[in-house]
Amino acid sequence: MSNIRRQSIISSLVIYMGFGVGLLNIYLFTKQGIFEEQQYGLYNAIIAIATLMMAFSSFGVPTYIYKFFPYYKSHLPDKKNDQAAIAIITGVIGFIFIIIAGIVLKQLVVKKYITNAPDIITYYQWIFPMGFGLLIFTLLEAWAWQIHKSVFTNFLRELGWRLFTLVLIILYSYQLISFDLFVKLFTFSYPFIAIVLLLYLLATRQIHFNFSISKVTRRFSGSIIKLSSFVYAGLVIFNISLVFDSLLIPSVLDDALAQLAIYSVAQNIASMIQAPQRGIISASMIHLSTAWKEKNKDLISRIYKRSSINQLIFATGFFSLVVLNLQDAVLTFQLKDTYLNAFYVVIFLGLAKVVDMGTGVNSQIIITSTFWRFEMFSGIILLAIMLPLSYILTKSNGIVGTAVAQLVSITVYNIIRVVFLWKKFRLQPFSVQSLYTLLLAGSCFAASYFLFRDLHSWAGLFARSIFFCVVFGVTATYMKLSPDIQPVLMQIQKKLGFRK
């Protein structure tokens, strides 16, 4: 657990640094006088479409790496390990199908977006390089997680990618490049970090491309195909659920890209709440795979419970801070007044993140278990709820309805998976500390709001934030809500020289 804790903490710090840069990017995107709402909406639409391309072309390869890496590692020397080569070749073949589909279906895309979001059509062909770069990075990232290099991959995805974007924003803000060139260069952001990761793995000799079929591949070929097929369907469904809102809004609402811009601001702010999740997932995947291989159910249970309480503490704390300060922040930082409309969207999307994080690494436990087929079935349920609900609520209530649909869908989805793990393995993520965390966050939120509700601008932002962080942090530590709090504090004290 100490290794998971260490990697999770370092990854979370890196991710929060990335979110710091991301906040700066959002500020520059939404500040008066630089970008139009439609331009920021286009930026987010490109990301959503590229994510969908990655999902469809991956063919479930990341899960194949997660599940079978321990077997390849145990039975083959590194230079004879063909798993990396199989992963990359499969991904390239998958993306060739995406290119063909993109050509065949272009007229359908034009028909869907030409009225409300014509800029998507203008830059349609430029989205493909971004989708391919995201695919290759995702495959290499899955490999890097298995060799305990999650910190570096999180650095590239969360910080490096945002720094790349920040450079482009600065160039555009000083009129050194046009918006047209900004978009085209931005579509090479993921190819850039994918190349960096590949060169790093090759230079450190931590990846080898053996194109001869190994005995492990021949032995497990049937299981690999079954796993990849089922999980691929589940991952496609899940990724559709992640980006469906960003694809739906431009197709059904008037002033589509401007509405998407407001929704995307809320989406990006809400995603800050989820920052520690990637660090915990990336650090725990190899341990979960190995634990299932060794039938170590106690370790799986500990990882499940700790991932739940640690994420819940982070999620409730950050959600409270965001809701307390969002409206004041928009006015204080002189963002466009239209972004005040993101407030209720942030609340519903933020609650969805709290639910998702509070239920722990249930998806990763299912994927690495012998019941990995259930990941697809639960994904179908998610999509069956989310798609019609999102369409109905978006048409009737705009972007707030979209956010409500996300909250309902994600809640039902996680309840189903929690119940499944309890029924099959008697595994569940909650404890009495989970309830205490919710009560503590609610109490601190109420105290911060009522004490400082008449204090605005910088004074209000600082007063509310400092009060909430101190009271919430000190009380959580005193109550020992997580078994990881004390070891982390001791480690920090040692680093600062306060403890030997």
Image: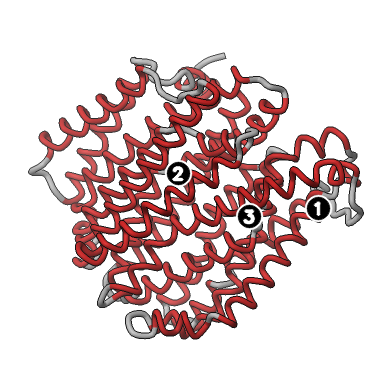
- Relative to 100, does residue 484 appear above or below in the rendering? above
* Type of amino acid at the residue the image marks with label 2: Ala
Q: What is the distance, in whole Å, between disc 1 and disc 2 at their CAs?
A: 29 Å
- Direction from residue 292 to residue 185 in the image, left or right: left
Of badges 2 and 3, the one in the foreground is: 3
Dot placed on the residue nearer the N-terminal end, 2 or 3: 3
* Type of amino acid at the residue the image marks with label 1: Ala
Residue where numbered disc 2 is placed: 275
Q: Where the N terminus falls, by quadrant?
A: top right
Res 147 visible: yes
Dot placed on the residue nearer the N-terminal end, 1 or 2: 1
Residue where numbered disc 1 is placed: 203
Q: What is the distance, in whole Å, between disc 2 and disc 3 at their CAs?
A: 17 Å
Identify the secondary structure beneath mark 3: helix
- Relative to 232, does residue 429 appear above or below in the rendering? above
Residue at 51% x, 27% y: name it: 304
- Direction from residue 472 to residue 294 in the image, left or right: right
Residue 94 horizontal/vertical position (percent): 68, 65
Q: Where the C terminus falls, by quadrant?
A: top right
- Direction from residue 146 to residue 326 in the image, left or right: left
Q: Nearer the viewer, residue 325 or 434?
A: 434
